Each structure stands twice: as structure tokens, then as C-alpha cells.
Amino acid sequence: MKALTLLTVALFFMPYFPSTNEMFVKIKANEVKTMEFPIGTKISIEGNVKYSIARGIKNGERKIFLSIYSEKNATVRVKYELPHKTMKAGEYDFLIIAPDKWVELIAPLKEHKESYGIKTKVVGLGEIYNRAKGRDDAEKIKYFIKDAIEEWGIKYVLLVGGRKYTGTWLIPVRYTWLNDRSSSWEYERRFISDLYYADVYNADGSFSSWDTNNNGYYGEYDHEIDGKKLSDKLDLYPDVYLGRLACRNERELKRVIKNIIDYENGHLTKKAILCGGDLYLHDPWDVAEGEYLLEEIAGKMEGYEIVRLYASEELDFRKINDAINEGADFVIFEGAGNHHLWATHAKDNEEWIYYYAWNIMQLKKEHLPIVLTSGARLGQFNRSRECFNWLFVSKGKAVASIGPTGLCWIGHGENVTKIFLGRLHILLCQEMTSSPTLGEAWGNAITEYLSEYSWQGVAKAFHMKAAEELELFGDPTLKIGYGTMKASTVNKIFHVGGSGPNNYTRIQEAINDASDGDTIIVHEGIYIEDLLIDKSLTIMGRNARIKTNGIVITAPDVSIEGFHIEGYGKGDGITCYGNGLLLKSNEIRLFNKSIVISAENCIIEGNEIKNNECGIWLNSIWLNSSWLNAEIRENTIKSNWYGIWMEKASASIERNNFSYNQWYALWVEGNDGKIEENTFFRNWYSIYLYNSQGFEISSNVIISNMHGPQFVNSIRNNIEGNTIKKNEHYGIYFGWRSKDNIITKNNFIENAQNARDD
């Protein structure tokens, strides 16, 4: 990155004007001065300087912004003519644009907003497309926003709808074609910018098309076509405060609306969590940029308790989740990323520290924060897979989030706080602690940022990109710091099936309407459903049968008890990403893998697991290389191809009955677990330890299997007090690179070979 000249910035606010309608402004070399005037003011400049005029909204008022820059000391004469009339008060404050089929679903949000004095108008896309002009649907929406400003006086806009699973859009996006003159240009020639919808006007009040050369490419800057570099003229200043709920279906929309309402009726923690590390390893500045930037942000968040989660202090996903679960108003990630995961380094350490999408899904939902991120494409919401920022909101783990839709640029060393996205984040965090709404904080921060720079040289593209890619996933009218203490929570009981007058007919409908801590009782019947359990619930069966092609658990602390669960396809049965699952007293059969655990501290107790390809599969793939721990006890695991398959686990396997499993009854790769008081009868392999160490294997009865316990590349395990009897090939086997295992007080009876060591 080339060295950049850092500029001095001064802002002039114009609450009144001298009667002469002119002023002389002194400017120091490389200083930018920005002055604000009422909408409609005519301005002229006399002096050998560079200047720009833009139009936008700041602190809820629409203004003209004059920015002046000079490479030398200069005095500038500014003449201005004030408008003869001012804009009238608006009929509405808030415009919500949504697909026609969702307009009725938004009614609760409209009612809630108006109860707080925010005059709200909900408009369907059909009305917009039939009424507004424009070259395509996106431009029709933007023209409608312009009309809404002028007819109704709206200041806030919410777009409701994202990308469908089919690849089409519920509400279209606009791609901006900006050449940031970096190596990334060849693989990111365009990126999404919802700032297109917010930047409605040019400085003279005309419509800002973002395509001033009319070639069908929007927001061009040095866009190369046939060897020519093309640029459109745009000022980028927001004229409305705009956010998007990138919902793909009604379920997401209902969840997000409920969370917005609950948040504004809730309470604050006055706490901010800051997560970061080093961005540029082994660079000459000797600064861990993420941590340095977060310290600057911490200084701007006056009145907030700061929780620092830095890579220099052994950061991992558990610390992040534990801190968020304790409650916070803001969670800020400063680091790198790739669409669906965030990452950082400890200072000058090559090893990555990851925070995955599945780590988000393991969070509780007791207090929803506002999330801010830096990292490549963490807000890029045009893929079939949900992006990192939107996932927080769509899954109910945050009330709103802000992140970049494209590759983002952060300054090196101490410059991280002075330029590009780092500087914009400082302004945004400062605004979030003082602005009344999240949208106003977003808009004011962009306006302040754009007013600080001269827009000269190579840095211009980076400055433009920082503003254009800053995506707000959330309600722009969200009251930051609003609300009163909630009354003590009363957990509810929902009934599915049975004869109650208000009982649900489907389990998923009850899940959708429930909240964390509630109980769902499912009465006798057959329920053919695929389920998503995204809340901390207790779900109890009363002679209920579920036929399913998959039950996915993303919330922590879920309990499922007393069901007959049967597969009807080739899918997995219960897949759990939420920590603290209790799976008790169920019969689970006819799946590919009946239970898949990719979470911690789960208990599988008293279940009958039979006739599956694999009974229980423990895998720490989503746990950032940690060793998964679980308790599996008092289950009957029979007639599967594999009974339990464990990878990178330290589980406790106790008092289970393994029988008639056709290949491995228990296959283990892990550390420091327990295999105690189990019975293994007529399995092909009984216990198979691979690449494992530190297991306590004791008091098991291992009888009439084709193979007794086998150890491969496994060390320092303790085998004590087991009865190993009448196994076909051998009683116990130690294979390749297995050593330092301790074998004491075991009974070997009538095995083909009692012991074998290769």
C-alpha cells in the first residue's frame, strides 16, 4: 500500500448566516473544511482551491455539504443565497418496502413503531412497480423513495427481502462497479451497495441515477471497458437512513420482527464486547491493528463497560460465545473474513483463530446485541448460503448487524484508525453511543467520513468503497438504548395435538411461536415434519411419533424427551449445533446417521438407537479444532452398521448396551475420555481406538464379538477391570504405533487369542 497524506479536517455548522450572504474561509495546506447549509442554498466559490458540493441528511435534517480542499494555505470567498422556503413537516417518518405477500406480516411492526410515535407507511412492490418510473425494478424503487421524501417527508427506509433460494431477488440489489486499483480488481469487479437506494439526490436536487454515462453499469469508478476507464458522478451522501432485512421466507421475517419489538421493549446491559487481533503479520509498524483499532473504539464508547476479547489473550470461539451469552448491547469484530466466517491472528502468529457460522448458531437468545464486523464479504448476501452478518439477524442471535458486502480495506499500523473502514468504524461506534436510532448512526457516520477526505489520488477508490459496502441489516429506526426493564420472564407451555381448543397441529408452528425457556408438549399422534429448533426449548413427547427427514438444532440448551423418531428418507435424524442438548428416552431409527453432535456438553441418555447406518456420530468439525465433549449413557445401541463414531472427542461412554452392530460398535478418535461399564455383545468390532490417548477403559463386559478391543496409533490409555470373553479373533489387539498403554486386572476368557501385539 502506498503512503498516504493524512489530512486535517474541520467541520463548520451553520445555525445562522451573516446578512452579507458571504464569508471568507481560511484553509491550511492539506486541510479539508466542510460547511453545512440548508437544502436549496445556492453556493459559489472564489479561490484557487478544490471543492465539492453534496446533498444528504444529518441528525435528521436534510442539508447541503460544501467541502473545500487546498494543497497550500489559502483564503476562499464563499457566496451563498438562502432558500426562500423550507421543507414542510412530513406526513410519515418511516417507509417499509416489501413484497406484496409480506405486507400483512409487517403489520405488527408498523403498529409497534406507531406506538412509539414513528409514523409508518408500508408499501408493496406491486404498487411501486405500477406507479414509479425507472429503467429496471431497482430504479423504480429508488424513484419511489424520492417521491416518498417529497410527498410524505420520510427519513427512514426499510427494504424487506433478500435473495431467494432460487437465485432471484425478493427485493433487487444494485451492484456498483468500482475499481479499487488493487489486486482484488480482477476477482471483485462489482459488489452490492444498498447505499444506492439511500443516495437519492445530486447536489442540485436532481435524481441520482448512479449511471450518469447511461451505459447500464452503476456506480462506476475507473471501470475498465475496452481499454477505457469509465466513472459515474455521484456524491454518496445518504438522503435517507436505510436498512435491509434480507429475509428469504416468512419464518425469518416473523422472527426478525418479533426480535425488533422485544428489543425495543427490553433493557440494556450498557456493555460492549470487542473482538480482534493482528491484521498484517510481521509488518514494519509492529502494531496489532485489530486490537489497536478496538482500543480507539473503546475510548469513543463513553458510558459502556468494555469487554476485551483479544487474540493476544488466547482468544477462541468459546470466550466469544460466553461473553455474548452474558449479555451485551454491541459486539464488534475487527479482523479478516470470508463471507460466512470471521478470523484473526494473535500478533505475528500465522495460526488463524476462527469464528464460524455454526458458532453463531450456538448462541443463546436472552439478550440480542447489535453486531459490527470487518472482514471480506461478511455482509455479501447474494449467495445461497447466508452471510456472516445476516446469519446473526436471521437466526435470532442479534437484533441488527452491520458489515461489508465486498472486500474491505483496513489501514496498516497506526493508520488503521485514520483511514478506510477502520476510521469509518470509529465514527460509527461514536454515533451508536449518541444517536437516537441505528439508521441515523449509520447515515451520520458515512456523512462524517465522506466529509473528511479530499477525494484525491489513489485513496479515493478505497474511501468510496468503505462507504458503499457498509450494509445495515436491520431496522433503521431501531432505538439505540431504548426501552425499560422487562418484567420477570414467565415461561409458557405449548401443546401440539390432543384436544385442547388452542392446541397446535404442527410441532414447527409451536416452535416458531415459542421463546427461550418455554416447554412444548406433543400429544399422541404421527407428525410428519422436518424441524428447525432455534430456541432453547424443552420438547416432550406423550406417545408421539415423528416421521422426518431431519431435525436440526441450532440453539443451546434444548431438551427432547419421550419420542419415537423415524426416518423416511436417506437423511440424518437429529443434527445438533447447539451446546447443552439433552436427548433422553427416545427411540430413534431408520436414518443415515440417527444423531449427529457438533456441539459441546451434550447428554444422550436412555435412548434406543437401532437400524441406522450410524447410531451416534460425534464430530468437532465446527468447533475450531477443540475436542468435543459429551456424555453418552444408558442407551441401547443395536443393529446399526456403526454404533458410535467419534472424531476428535473426549466423551464419556458409560453403561450403554451395544449389540448386533454390523461393523464398529464404538470407533473412537479422541483424548482423555471414559469408556466404562458398557456391554458389547455380538458386534463385529467392539471397541476400536484410533489415534487416541488418555482414555479410561474399565469395567466393561465384552463378549462374543468378532473382535475384542483394538488399539491403533494409540498411547497412554488405561485398560482395567474389564471382562473380555469368547471373542472370535482376539481378546485385545495393539497395532501400529500403539505404546505405553496400561493393562491391569482384566479377565480374558476363551478368546481365540487373548492378546495380540503387532
Image (cartoon, helix red, strand yellow):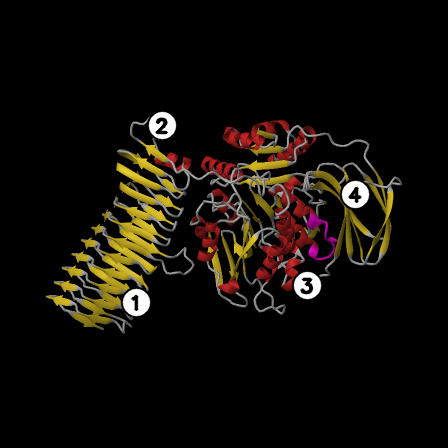
User: In the image, what residue type sits under mark 4?
Assistant: Met
Q: Which of marks 1 and 2 is in front?
A: 2
In the image, residue 430 sits, relative to residue 352, either above or below, namely above
Name the residue nearer the viewer: 622 or 535.
535
Could you tell which of marks 1 and 2 lies nearer the N-terminus? 2
In the rendered structure, which disc, 4 or 3, sits on the residue that comes first in sequence?
A: 3
At x 61% / y 32%, what residue is drawn? Answer: 118
Residue range (magenta): 448-459
Q: Residue at x 23, y 64 (%)?
A: 697
Residue at 30% in and 47% down: 583
The residue wearing badge 1 is: 694
Q: CA separation, marks 4 and 3? A: 37 Å
Circle number at residue 14: 4
Q: Are marks 1 and 4 in contact (CB under 8 Å)?
A: no
Looking at this view, name the residue that lies furthest to the top: 501
Tag nearer the camera, 1 or 3: 1
Q: Does the magenta stretch include residue 485?
A: no
- Circle 2 sits on which residue? 502
